[in-house]
Image: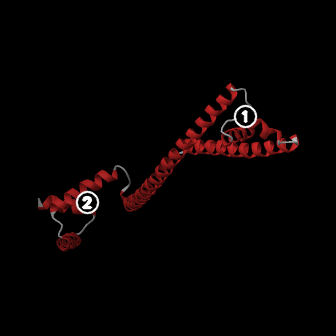
């Protein structure tokens, strides 16, 4: 065995003094690092496996690159966790707003249903929606006079100037029309917001 070792050293161009110094240095370093022969074997196997992926001289750079990749992934993971947390908060806020919009929308639906039914009844009675203010005034007069036809006719004779009556009718109709358009606009925007959410 000694002869074979000596021949190997000779082929490698290593003298006996160099070999002893080399082995002593390795042994002392292993002792300081508390590295056993089994560990050396396992480390060498891992290096051999890694050398199939990258050249041994490039292993330090490869490990550094992998370390940076892991750090980047960790950073992305933390950012995603933060985004998920923020998204959950935003989802809670949006759900709350959506529920509020739904409640408001239900009220608007009731108002629209009332408007539609009222319009249908007026149409059935052959009364234009533009005459709603005048119709309302008529109902008010009828109610105040106890629905007495003669008194009602006498009250209508008091309107000597038909232009004043038309102006009053138009002004009242414009007010009610504006209120109705605002209600329809609110309903439309509420539907848009619900669809968006």
Asked if residue 51 lies left or right of residue 177, the reply is: left
In the picture, measured across the screen, residue 161 lies left or right of residue 133, that is right
**Is residue 130 in view?**
no
Q: Quadrant of the N terminus?
A: bottom left
Residue 16 is situated, as x and y percent measured from the top left of the image, at 20, 70
Q: Position of residue 9 (x, y in %)?
A: 22, 63
Residue under the point 79% across and 38% down: 154
For this rendering, which residue is in front, 9 or 29?
A: 29
* Distance between the alpha carbons at the discs numbered 2 and 1: 114 Å
Instruction: Look at 59% across and 45% down and name the residue there.
Output: 190
Residue placed most toward the observer, 182 or 117: 117
In this view, the mark in front (2 or 1): 1
Is there any visible trace of residue 10 in the rendered image?
Answer: yes
Q: In the image, is 43 to the left or to the right of 3?
A: right
- Residue 62 lies, in percent from the top left, at 39, 58
Task: Identify the disc placed on residue 129.
Answer: 1
Q: Is residue 9 above or below residue 138?
A: below
Q: Secondary structure at mark 1?
A: helix
Q: Residues within 10 Å of mark 1 (few under 14, many from 20)?
A: some
63 shown above or below 169: below
**Where residue 109 sits: x, y (%)?**
56, 39
Judge whether 144 appears above or below 75 on screen: above
Q: Which residue is mark 2?
A: 11
């Amino acid at each position: 065995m000694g002869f074979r070792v000596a021949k190997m050293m000779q082929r490698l161009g290593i003298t006996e003094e160099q070999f002893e110094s080399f082995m002593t240095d390795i042994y002392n370093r292993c002792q300081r690092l508390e590295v056993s022969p089994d560990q050396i074997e396992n480390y060498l196997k891992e290096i051999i496996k890694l050398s199939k992926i990258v050249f041994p001289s490039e292993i330090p750079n490869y490990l550094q690159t992998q370390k940076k990749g892991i750090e980047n992934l960790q950073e992305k993971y933390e950012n995603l966790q933060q985004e998920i947390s923020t998204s959950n908060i935003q989802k809670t806020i949006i759900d709350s707003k959506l529920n509020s919009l739904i409640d408001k929308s239900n009220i608007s639906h009731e108002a629209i249903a009332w408007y539609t039914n009222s319009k249908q009844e007026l149409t059935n009675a052959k009364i234009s929606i533009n005459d709603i203010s005048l119709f309302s005034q008529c109902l008010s007069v009828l109610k105040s006079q106890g629905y007495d036809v003669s008194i009602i006719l006498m009250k209508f004779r008091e309107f000597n100037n038909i232009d004043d009556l038309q102006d009053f009718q138009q002004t009242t109709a414009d007010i009610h029309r504006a209120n109705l358009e605002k209600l329809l606009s609110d309903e439309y925007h509420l539907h848009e917001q619900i669809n968006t959410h």
